[in-house]
Image: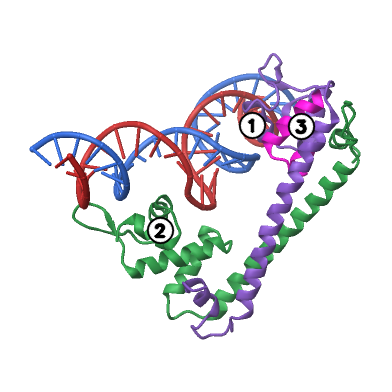
Chain colours: A purple, B green, C blue, D red
Amino acid sequence: MNISEAARLSGLSTKTIRYYESIALISAAVRNENGYRDYSERELDTLRFLQRARSTGFSVEECRQLLDLYLNTGRQSSHVKSLVQEKIARVEAQLEQLQAMRTTLAKLAERCAGDEGPHCAILDELADNEN
Amino acid sequence: MNISEAARLSGLSTKTIRYYESIALISAAVRNENGYRDYSERELDTLRFLQRARSTGFSVEECRQLLDLYLNTGRQSSHVKSLVQEKIARVEAQLEQLQAMRTTLAKLAERCAGDEGPHCAILDELADNEN
DNA sequence: AGTTGACATTCCTCTTGCTGGAAGCTTTAG
DNA sequence: CTAAAGCTTCCAGCAAGAGGAATGTCAACT
């Protein structure tokens, strides 16, 4: 099948598929006579796997490792699990950061009158060295 | 004062300060005879403002707007407040996304044996079209 | 005076994960 | 036969700087 069909069936864009090939995340597709890339079911599976892993939040480099494990039948499931657990830890750290941000922003908003006047507690706060 | 002192006192790096100048987030610094940038207290205030706004989570473009309001004494505080409120909404959306990700990852991890065998529910899940 | 080390300057490349566009093929539909 | 759609490659750009090279300058020490 052509790249656009592979894209449609995998949920990736054609640009993304070519990009994945260019960074060697997937192996170079076979070409047929006209020079067009040709995808088999097997490669489609890989593309689908990537689409899922990416939308689950794994980075491309993490996907590279997962894909390695996915394709390697001699893997140990403990390797996969520890990858996922590390990922969870990173996500939780980011969550804490965002929550702190939200708290800060909410405090700022609360103290600003939000009227037509120029005085604004938000700007004061951002400008204040003693904060 | 030289750029490194301005950096030290504002909490930004010299690289960042030059970068902000290059994208016209701040106006070009005055140069003294040797060609070095020279910063006054007034400009230091602006740098500090930016440092705070960035670490509060505002993007550079958002900082540009905040700075505009900060320096414009004819501003209306409602403008500032609505900027902050929009930001809060974006942060909350991102929080939800991350929480969903964490949930998904936790479910994946939970179902994987994590032993020396090759079988792994995580990979199955990522590969499964029907998921 | 010379030298060393810590500053300063500009410019260029790299990062992440693509997306958009240009120029030029081929294939398909009318 | 022509026009549109689809394919190819390559180049540029987004965010927000970080890192480094090549070069210039300043202050201190000998």
Determine whether A61 is above or below B50 in the image: above
Q: Which chain letter goes with mark 1?
A: A
- Amino acid type assigned to the residue bearing label 1 in the image: Tyr
**In what element is the residue under mark 2?**
helix
Write down the region rendered in magenta: A52-71
Circle 1 is placed at which residue position?
Answer: A19
- Give the distance between the C-alpha atoms of the residues marked 1 and 2, in whole angstroms: 41 Å
Q: Is residue A109 magenta?
A: no
Circle 2 is placed at which residue position?
Answer: B8
Circle 3 is placed at which residue position?
Answer: A66
Are labels 1 and 2 on one chain?
Answer: no
Determine whether A43 is above or below B54 in the image: above
Name the spot of residue B46 as percent of width and height, x first.
41, 67
**In what element is the residue under mark 3?**
helix
- Outermost residue toward the top in this view: A33
Mark 2 neighbour density, 10 Å: few (under 14) some (14–19) many (20 or more): few
